[in-house]
Every structure is written in structure tokens, then in C-alpha cells.
Image (cartoon, helix red, strand yellow):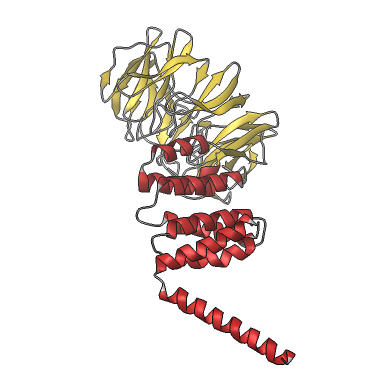
């Protein structure tokens, strides 16, 4: 037989067989087609031929039939085997996204996706997946992994000689004796050029340069000047700032216009109220300087910025002890010391030389076991253990290791901490990578 004729016959037979195979495949149900493709891919995978298994499994997965879950499972295994090849990370995560977007998505898919992101140091992406998984499934396993992962953080590259407590995502910062305002990433909004500076509120702050006291905007432009005779000021909040005049402290407005009443002291406003002192006794005033709590106490507990009032609660000091005052009622429990409530969470209180935490009803929520503590801000509180500061969650568990020389409360996901390099901002990665709690 002529060689050319023989080759032609062989090719024709192969074509007929291929056509017959195609016809046979097309005659089968989607589920049968899936099994054929999966079995062919499995044989290749058993021999380490992953790259040729990809189109077979992608075709099998595209049928959305009874064996789709198995096809997708095998396909993810192939993608992971080829993950170092260009484009396969995206193929793998796209398949996971497809599975997570299904109405009946299983918790295991969210956990698989989150662990992949965690293993590749994409913590923000992992946390976003876990939050979505919690919302969709309420799975205890997803919640557990989220709690283990959500406290990862970064420290700002920029550092300062001192950082005050934060106020709505900004803080007063000091370098070489001069003050400015910084964001939580450490970058300056207002440069370190002032002798004194208040908190940053509604894009403005009050500053002192030499003997001059005036208000500035975010570009350091003067927007108001204090009257002659003003010698000091406290922190700016809720369109009010205390100014020291020759006849005492008076509440002033945004443009530094003075209120009529004078006091021996006015603290920073929070939740529309501030601590105030008159006649040697302390109470709490509202925005119009009317008394919410009459001035009959030895002291009102304030934080570093001068705030005292939160969640309708305040701590008063009398006869050497501290009592909680909530909604006009004093609790029976006595404490040695306390920190004010913030907008949410428990307050730190001291008894017998140790610090614990209570709610606004005065009930102990976390036992007295810390050397020092600050009240919760959000879901974290700074505590001191064995000479170093870290952070606990509302269960009293240390979730950010106690390794800082000093630490302050969180605001919008960031907190000032003192490290061996100086004062820096600690920011939870969760707050850098998208939606937050």
C-alpha cells in the first residue's frame, strides 16, 4: 500500500474517532459530561500534569450540574498547585468569590478564602471576607477566626516626642517643644510650630504663639483672635472651648466669643457636658453652663483631654472615694479611682490597687487584675501588665501584646503608643483596608 494512502487512512480514522467521541460526549447529560471531564483531569493530576487538567476542570465546573462542587474542588486544587504561575492567584480567588456569592454559600468557603489571604499577608482582604461570612452565615468558626485576626496592626513610620490622647482620628503631637496636629498615620495636618495647641475640631484648633492666643484652620490661617487678657485655654469640642480670663474660666464659642459665667475650672465638653468647679466644689455643666450635677463634690474624674462625661455617666469623688453617677443616680459601689466612660464600652475602675472594668450600671464586667488601665473605646482598652502596656477585648483577653512603654485609647481604629523609637500611632489593619465595625 502506498505510504501516502496509508497516512490518509490513519488520519481519517482518527478524525472519525474524534468526531464519534464528540458526538458521544454531546449526547450525554451535563452530569455525565462532568464526570468524564473530571476523570480525565484526575488522571493528568495523578501524573503531575496540572496545566492540562485546567481546561478540563474549568469546562466541567461551567456546567453547574450535580458534580459542579466536585469539579470546583478539584479545580481549586489545580489552581493552588499552579499558584506560582502568572494569573492563577486571580483564578483561584475568583472561584472563591463565585462560591461565596452563592445564596447557600457554606462557612467553609469563607474560611478557606480568609486563610488564603492571611497566608499571603493580605490581612485587610481576609477581614473583609470574614465580616461577609459572619453576615451571611453567623458561623461560630468564622467568628472565632475573625476574632483571632482582627487585631493585627501597623505602626506609623513617623514618630514624635509626645502624642496626646486621640480625638476623632487626630491627636496633638509634640516635637522639640513645639505642637501640631497629626492624623493617625502620623502625617501632620498642622505643623509643629506652636507653643500650645488644642484638639482639632471641625477643621480648626486654638493655638498659642508666645502671648498670642487665636484660632486657626487646617491651613494654619487665623480665623479668630482671643480677647486681650486671655492667658490659657483647654481643649476644643462641640463648638465650645474653655478660656482663662482674669476672673476665671469661661466657656467660649467657635469664634472665641466668651460666655457670661465664670468658673474656677471648666473641662473639655463630651456628650454636651463638662466638669466644672466653683466655690471649691465640682459638678457638671451643660453647653449653656447650667448645672446637670450640682457642685457639691471634691472632684470629677477626667481623662487626659479633660473629658468626664460619657454614656450619660460620670465619676464623682467624695471623702477619698469614687462613685458612679448615671442618669442622675449614684451607684452604691465605692472605688479608689476610675477613668471616664467613652462613647461606648466599659469604664476602668480601681479597687485594692488593681484595675477592672464596669458597665454604666456599676456591674463588674472584667475582674480587678490589671496594674493600670484606661476605659474601653470601641471594643479595646489599654491595660498595663508587668510593667508594659497592651490591649484587651471586652472578654478581658489580651489581644494586642503588652509590649509598649505607654499606650492610649483607640479612636477610629488608631491609638498612640510609646515604643523604643518614641511615640507612634498604632493602627489596626482592619481600619486601613475597608469597612470597619
What residue is drawn where x is 48% and y is 14%?
Answer: 369
Q: In front here: 285 or 386? A: 386
127 relative to 175, above or below: below
In terms of depth relative to the viewer, which is nearer, 220 or 109? 109
Image quarter where the N terminus lies is bottom right
Name which residue lies at 55% across and 57% down. Answer: 92
Is there any visible trace of residue 123 in the rendered image?
Answer: no
From the viewer's side, name the closer residue of 364 and 194.
364
Percent x, y for residue 332? 29, 12
Residue 299 in percent (x, y) is at 40, 16
Q: Is there any visible trace of residue 165 in the rendered image? A: yes
Q: Residue at x 60, y 31 (%)?
A: 417
From what the image shows, is residue 432 above or below residue 303? below
- Relative horizontal placement of residue 428, taking residue 300 as reference (left or right): right
Q: Is 338 drawn above or below residue 182 in the view shown?
A: above
- Write the residue at 56% across / 62% down: 41
- Left or right: 14 with respect to 200? right
Counting from the top left corner in percent of width and height, residue 361 is at 29, 22
Amino acid at each position: 500500500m502506498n505510504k501516502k494512502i496509508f497516512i490518509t487512512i490513519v488520519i481519517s480514522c482518527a478524525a472519525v474517532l474524534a468526531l464519534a467521541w464528540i458526538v458521544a460526549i454531546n449526547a450525554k447529560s451535563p452530569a455525565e459530561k462532568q464526570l468524564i471531564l473530571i476523570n480525565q483531569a484526575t488522571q493528568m493530576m495523578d501524573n503531575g500534569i496540572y496545566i492540562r487538567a485546567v481546561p478540563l476542570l474549568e469546562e466541567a465546573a461551567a456546567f453547574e450540574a450535580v458534580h459542579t462542587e466536585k469539579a470546583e474542588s478539584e479545580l481549586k486544587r489545580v489552581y493552588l498547585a499552579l499558584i506560582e504561575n502568572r494569573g492563577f492567584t486571580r483564578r483561584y480567588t475568583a472561584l472563591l468569590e463565585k462560591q461565596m456569592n452563592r445564596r447557600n454559600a457554606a462557612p467553609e468557603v469563607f474560611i478557606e478564602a480568609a486563610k488564603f489571604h492571611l497566608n499571603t499577608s493580605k490581612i485587610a482582604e481576609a477581614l473583609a471576607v470574614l465580616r461577609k461570612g459572619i453576615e451571611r452565615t453567623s458561623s461560630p468558626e468564622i467568628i472565632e477566626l475573625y476574632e483571632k485576626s482582627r487585631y493585627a496592626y501597623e505602626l506609623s513610620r513617623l514618630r514624635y516626642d509626645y502624642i496626646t490622647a486621640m480625638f476623632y482620628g487626630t491627636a496633638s503631637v509634640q516635637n522639640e517643644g513645639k505642637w501640631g496636629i497629626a492624623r493617625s498615620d502620623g502625617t501632620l495636618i498642622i505643623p509643629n510650630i506652636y507653643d500650645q495647641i488644642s484638639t482639632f475640631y471641625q477643621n480648626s484648633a486654638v493655638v498659642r504663639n508666645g502671648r498670642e492666643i487665636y484660632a486657626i484652620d487646617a491651613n494654619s490661617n487665623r480665623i479668630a483672635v482671643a480677647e486681650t487678657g486671655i492667658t490659657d485655654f483647654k481643649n476644643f469640642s462641640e463648638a465650645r472651648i474653655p478660656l482663662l480670663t482674669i476672673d476665671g474660666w469661661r466657656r467660649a464659642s467657635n469664634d472665641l466669643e466668651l460666655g457670661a459665667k465664670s468658673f474656677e475650672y471648666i473641662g473639655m465638653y463630651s456628650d454636651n457636658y463638662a466638669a466644672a468647679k466653683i466655690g471649691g466644689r465640682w459638678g457638671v455643666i451643660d453647653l449653656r453652663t447650667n448645672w446637670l450635677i450640682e457642685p457639691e463634690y471634691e472632684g470629677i474624674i477626667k481623662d487626659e483631654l479633660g473629658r468626664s462625661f460619657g454614656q450619660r455617666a460620670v465619676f464623682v469623688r467624695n471623702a477619698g472615694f469614687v462613685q458612679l453617677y448615671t442618669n442622675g443616680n449614684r451607684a452604691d459601689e465605692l472605688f479608689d479611682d476610675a477613668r471616664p466612660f467613652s462613647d461606648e464600652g466599659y469604664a476602668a475602675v480601681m479597687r485594692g490597687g488593681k484595675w477592672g472594668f464596669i458597665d454604666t450600671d456599676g456591674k463588674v464586667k472584667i475582674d480587678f487584675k490589671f496594674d493600670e488601665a484606661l476605659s474601653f473605646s470601641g471594643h479595646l482598652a489599654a491595660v498595663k501588665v508587668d510593667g508594659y502596656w497592651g490591649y484587651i477585648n471586652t472578654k478581658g483577653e489580651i489581644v494586642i501584646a503588652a509590649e509598649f512603654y505607654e499606650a492610649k485609647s483607640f479612636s477610629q481604629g488608631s491609638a498612640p503608643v510609646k515604643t523604643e523609637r518614641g511615640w507612634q500611632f498604632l493602627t489596626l489593619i482592619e481600619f486601613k483596608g475597608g469597612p470597619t465595625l
